[in-house]
Amino acid sequence: MSKPTTFVAVTSMYVLSMTMMFLCPKVIVSAGAADKAAKFDEVGKLLLPSDYRTWVFVGATVTPNEMNGGKAAFPEFHTIYMDPASYKIYKNTGEFPEGTMMIKETLMIGGKKAPSGNGYFMGDFVLLAAGVKDTKRFGGERAGWGFFVFGNPSDQQPKSEVFPAAKCNSCHAAAAQERVFIQYYPVLQDAKPK
Ligand code: HEC
């Protein structure tokens, strides 16, 4: 009589452990290739995803020209997005998976007065920049991240070449996690498992 009981017990343990493997988020370390937001052409140019404004909005910063000697390093408002598949993994692991793509759109300050009060209000779009984690493509001094500029979001070039490391990666070495400035992105700080 004990045999069927043992068999049932072993079978249920197996089913349970398989279910745990599927359910346990830590097991998922990277998204499948099909899920990856970052896609490259045959010569390694990054293709601009058309749907990035539906991605996860992780933070916004503003560097007004008037506080930066008349010309800030980047046009004034910056809005930052992360691809949703990588965000999901980040939320579980606290790490950026291979293929993570971050997008930054910049806009000028359009006005300083609104019914809500005095302040800085968004004006025209100026440029769109991207960062992609791909340790195979962007090794060495790039430390796993490639950076790209696509120009004005309303007049897009569909592809961009990786920028020289000295132009982007060196400044991004001051970022709090890898090459991403999570110190300015409250959504990512909140998403990181404690
Ligand atoms: C002077 C320093 C500096 C340089 C140079 C720089 N960045 Fe950044 N970048 C920042 C800072 C600081 C942030 C954090 C958000 C913000 O304030 O814009 C940032 C954020 C970003 C983000 C959002 C994701 C992230 O990594 O935090 C992208 C994408 C980006 N930069 C692209 C570029 C590209 C492309 C270049 C080269 C053309 C570049 N950056 C050069 C300082 C710099």
Image (tube, rainbow, N blue to C red):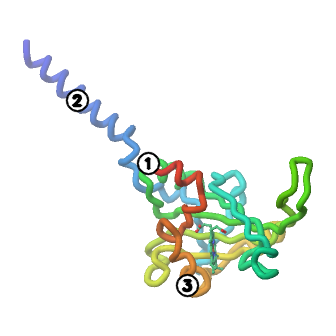
Q: Residues within 10 Å of mark 3 (few under 14, many from 20)?
A: some
- How far apart are labels 2 and 3 at the CA level? 51 Å
State left or right for residue 153 relative to residue 136. right
In the depicted structure, whether residue 81 falls above or below residue 130: above
Q: Which one is in front, 46 or 55?
A: 55
- How far apart are labels 3 and 1 at the CA level? 31 Å
According to the image, label 1 marks what residue? 193
User: Any atom of ligand 1 within 8 Å of the CB at mark 2?
Assistant: no
According to the image, label 3 marks what residue? 165
Which comes before the other along the chain, label 2 or label 3?
A: 2
Quadrant position of ligand 1: bottom right
Q: Which one is in front, 43 or 151?
A: 151
- Tell me where residue 138 appears, x and y as whole percent: 49, 78
Amino acid type assigned to the residue bearing label 2 in the image = Met
Q: Residues within 10 Å of mark 1 (few under 14, many from 20)?
A: few
Amino acid type assigned to the residue bearing label 1 in the image = Pro
**Residue 156 in sight in this render:** no
Q: Which one is in front, 50 or 55?
A: 55
Amino acid type assigned to the residue bearing label 3 in the image = Ala
**Residue pictured at 56% horizontal, 66% vertical:** 181
Which comes before the other along the chain, label 3 or label 1?
A: 3
- Mark 2 and 3 residues: CB-CB less than 8 Å, in contact? no
- Mark 1 and 2 residues: CB-CB less than 8 Å, in contact? no
State left or right for residue 30 relative to residue 175. left
According to the image, label 2 marks what residue? 13
Q: Secondary structure at mark 3?
A: loop
Q: Secondary structure at mark 1?
A: loop
Residue 49, which numbered label? none
In the depicted structure, whether residue 56 falls above or below residue 129: above
**Residue pictured at 47% horizontal, 51% vertical:** 192
Q: Secondary structure at mark 2?
A: helix
**Residue 133 in sight in this render:** yes
